[in-house]
Image (cartoon, helix red, strand yellow):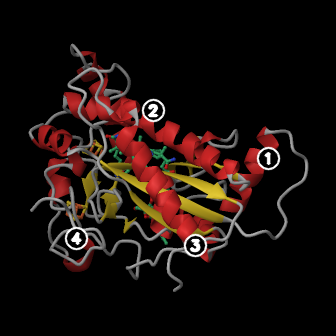
Amino acid sequence: MEPMGNFQAALVQAIQEYVHTSKLNRLRNIDQSPIWEEPLVGFADGDDALFDRYKVVVGETHLTPREALNAARRDENRAELLGSEAVSVVSWILPAARQTRLDNRAMTAGPSLRWNHSRFQGEELNDSLRRYVVAWLKQKHIEAAAPVLTGQFETLRSSKGWGSTWSERHAAYAAGLGTFSLSDGLITARGVAHRCGSVVAGVHWTPSPRRYTHHLENCTYYRDGSCKACMARCPAGAIGPEGHDKDKCREFLFVTLAEWVKKPRYIDSYGACGLCQTKVPCEHQIPDGRETEAQSLEP
Ligand code: B12
Ligand code: SF4
Ligand code: SF4
């Protein structure tokens, strides 16, 4: 594995700096504290065979990185498609701030105020980071696009249930940032309480190492059958020994919690709950003290 080049290191620094300094990364209607802590960043080869496999595990409409760049070309009315040029992916994890996790730990029936604001205002930051990274790369004459901001992005229901044409977690998995779990959340070195994003670029980058051998490795339940803390946490009964029932979860978020988010000061959208991502052993770390690249900041 080649070491990460200076250019990649500069991009990592630019992403971290952006999250650190952007006014959008503040709970502007609560106490101005940061929404997300320092991001984790990883890279994947856009022609990694995993992206072909995603056409099976996510759905046939899931885009490869090359298709995502072509989708962006179509958005710009460019007729010619990419040839055999190198394509890479940069993916990031935005770990939820400590106070947001602590507040949500105390909840049992729906999200805390901070979790609710972090979901919606935090995604504004995530979108703006996607645009920033694309602009940063284009300024250096590298073709780039954020797949979820292209015209071909869609949230849809396939034979695999609810999904989309670009799964940010699958991009992060390919970029060595973490594995899936019983709750479906991606367990990273900074845990599962996060949001993630990515950009594809017409360039060759050194891929980050994947320090796992299968897609469920970081979850204790899939290692030794124990834990199941997320099962007990889910107020909708949407997590069982077979995994996460997306229909039950979705119904709870969009229907049951519709009243919850009408409370004073809440952002009245859908009821993103995230209880399965807080007060669980994988909340802010890989459980069981396993070796991690970036150690958690707290015990
Ligand atoms: C559709 C959607 C939903 C749906 C369905 C969720 C789902 N599991 O797909 C509903 C409405 C239920 C939902 C709920 C929530 N969501 Co949502 N949602 C999405 C969205 C838009 C698309 C997800 C997608 O395409 N999934 C594709 C399906 C097929 O993948 P999957 O089920 O996750 O993956 C399984 C298979 O691939 C399987 N698998 C089988 N074989 C193999 C082989 C290999 C090699 C691999 C890698 C995998 C694999 O393993 C996986 C786990 O079982 C993404 C944003 C995005 N563009 O990615 C956000 C996203 C997944 N949501 C997110 C969040 C935070 C939530 C909520 C916590 C709400 C909240 N904000 O509080 C809940 C919790 C859901 C949960 N427990 O996972 C985050 C998750 C980050 C994280 N921490 O993991 C995302 C990534 C948004 C973001 N930009 O950060 N969501
Ligand atoms: S709470 Fe336990 S069983 Fe659930 S995802 Fe986390 S490690 Fe796995
Ligand atoms: S987001 Fe809420 S309803 Fe959905 S699986 Fe997690 S705890 Fe259950």
Q: How many marks?
A: 4
Task: Identify which amino acid the numbered label 3 is placed on.
Answer: Leu
Q: Nearer the viewer, mark 3 or mark 2?
A: 2
Q: Are marks 1 and 4 in contact (CB under 8 Å)?
A: no
Query: According to the image, label 2 marks what residue?
Result: 124
Query: According to the image, label 3 marks what residue?
Result: 50
Classify mark 1: residues with Cα within 10 Å, few (<14), some (14-19) or many (20+).
some
**Label 1, label 3: how many angstroms apart (C-alpha)?**
23 Å
Q: Mark 2 or mark 4: which comes first in sequence? A: 2
Q: Quadrant of residue 262?
A: top left
**Label 4, label 3: how many angstroms apart (C-alpha)?**
24 Å
Q: Mark 3 or mark 2: which comes first in sequence? A: 3
Query: According to the image, label 1 marks what residue?
Result: 73
Percent coordinates x, y for residue 271 in the rendering: 31, 30
Percent coordinates x, y for residue 133 in the rendering: 56, 48
Percent coordinates x, y for residue 37 in the rendering: 29, 48
**For residue 273, above or below residue 53:** above
Which quarter of the rendered image does ligand 3 occupy? top left
Task: Identify which amino acid the numbered label 4 is placed on.
Answer: Tyr
Where's the C terminus, which quadrant? bottom left
**For residue 204, above or below residue 161:** below
Give the numbered dot on residue 18: none
Q: Nearer the viewer, mark 1 or mark 3?
A: 1
Q: Nearer the viewer, mark 1 or mark 4?
A: 1
- Give the left or right position of residue 193, taking residue 19 as reference: left
Q: Mark 4 or mark 3: which comes first in sequence? A: 3
Task: Identify which amino acid the numbered label 1 is placed on.
Answer: Arg
Give the numbered dot on residue 221: 4
Q: Are marks 1 and 3 in contact (CB under 8 Å)?
A: no
Q: Nearer the viewer, mark 2 or mark 4?
A: 2
* Mark 4 within 8 Å of ligand 2, using the beta carbon: yes
Residue 143 in view here: yes
